Image: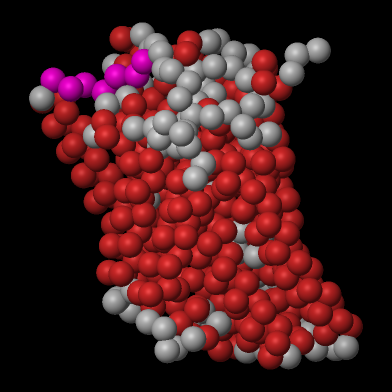
Amino acid sequence: MSSPQSEAPGVERFGYQQELRRSLGFADLLIYGLIFMVPIAPFGIFGSVFQSSGGMVALAYVIGMVAMAFTALSYAQMARAFPMAGSVYTYAGRGIAAPVGFLAGWVILLDYVLVPSLLYLVASAAMTSFVPGVPIWVWLIAFIVLNTVVNYLGIEMTARMNKIMLVAELIVLAIFLVVGAVALAQGKGHGAALSPLFDSSTFSWPLAFGAVSVAVLSFLGFDGISMLAEESRESSRRLGRSMVFALALAGALFVVQTWVAALLAPNRADLLTKGDPAGTAFYDTAEYAGGHWLSVLTAVATAVAWGFANSLVAQAATSRLLFAMARDRQLPAFLGKVHPKHRVPVNATFLVAGVSLVLGLYMSSRDDGITLLGTLVNFGAMTAFLALHVSVVVHYVVRNRSRDWWRHLVAPAIGFLILLYVVINASIAAQVLGFVWLAIGVVILAGSYMMGRRPTLSAVTPEANE
């Protein structure tokens, strides 16, 4: 029987050298995906999703999980075909054409490059609310420096920290669920038991899918597992399976915790009409259910989870995307440098830290900083996922004449249509800023052609690069 190491396909057949260290097993990949999604992610955006969904928070997360499930299936198929770093950039570039890959990579940069800034900003704001004597920029710098050091020391160090943080988050979540169940048993609940899933007084499909465009922020991260393809010692099949498992586990946790919180929310009417600009709706609910200590516990857990655990893996994934694009000469070559000892893309790691610092400090000065970053992150991810679904159909059905209609045509088509509807129902600001970013990418691509630097990928035929 072959070992996992022997099953893991090398990148040499695609024209690259194996530079990153293969040291991650299935459990490491699964934990990485869970940490990236953050098992307690709904804590921080519960009020926003509650308002946008008309109180049907659980429904928004169920639809989001279904939409992401089809996306995870497409990721699993492309990870089997191209087991290397780069995520949608690699899959669209090799599955469709190199220029499409560049544009897909450019669009998903809105997700990967901006999400660390968003996470640091949310966490720093939360910590400042508890320790007002420390300015927000101090927390921002502290989180960034800590995560950069851990990522610099190698992927094994990141994996060890992931396990510790995952256990801590699950303990906090279990405490909230137990206390919440007791509170419901004591009659503290509001509304019908099924109202978080369906409320006839507020339901409409545009409303539900509009809420998904916000709730889906909690799911972003399962795809980050694909960034570690060159550091996994598992087969490409198990790499894809880890994405599906991580998504299913996180989705179940999201639905359960938001269902309980929606039933206990003490200020339902205000949330529906005024929203949650301070981002404290979940913590207020926790206090109503169990007291001030539970409010503090859930708020601090959110700050640590977003500012350290989630942003740690987000920085790691973003650096791998930059590394993959630089290796193909579609970004500056210095981003493709790998540290000789730690075997990590060192310059890309430092660049992500720098961008996070500059953007975090700037957005902290804006009243709409968190909202603006959140809408851009979601739009970038959803648009790139559309390209992913198309790449599955083109690579398997069009090029390789696959007759596996479910995995290679029907499932990607369903995933594409669901996400397209989500993008259409997203906020106008997200659409405008997202398309401006895409237009900038088109201009850069056109400039590359004019200068004779047409995007190409190693070990891809010239026809596929067209």
User: Residue visible at 44% across and 88% down?
Assistant: 132
Quadrant of residue 463 in the image?
top left
Residue 31 to residue 309: above or below: above
Q: Visible in this render: residue 145?
A: yes
Q: Residue furthest right?
A: 185
Q: Judge whether residue 455 is colored magenta.
A: yes
The number of numbered badges drawn on the structure is 0
Q: Position of residue 252 (x, y in %)?
A: 74, 56
What colour scheme has been applied to the protein in the rendered image? Answer: secondary structure
Q: Position of residue 196 (x, y in %)?
A: 71, 71
Residue 203 to residue 335: above or below: below
User: Residue visible at 57% across and 58% down?
Assistant: 309
Quadrant of residue 135 in the image?
bottom left
User: Residue visible at 83% across and 75% down?
Assistant: 178
Q: Main secondary structure of the magenta part?
A: loop
Q: Position of residue 361 (x, y in %)?
A: 30, 69
Q: Is residue 57 left or right of residue 441?
A: right
Q: Residue furthest left?
A: 451
Residue 294 to residue 247: above or below: below
Q: Is residue 363 left or right of residue 190?
A: left
Q: Nearer the viewer, residue 249 or 439?
A: 249
Magenta residues (range):
452-458
In the picture, the quarter occupied by the N terminus is: top right
Q: Visible in this render: residue 54?
A: no
In the picture, the quarter occupied by the C terminus is: top left
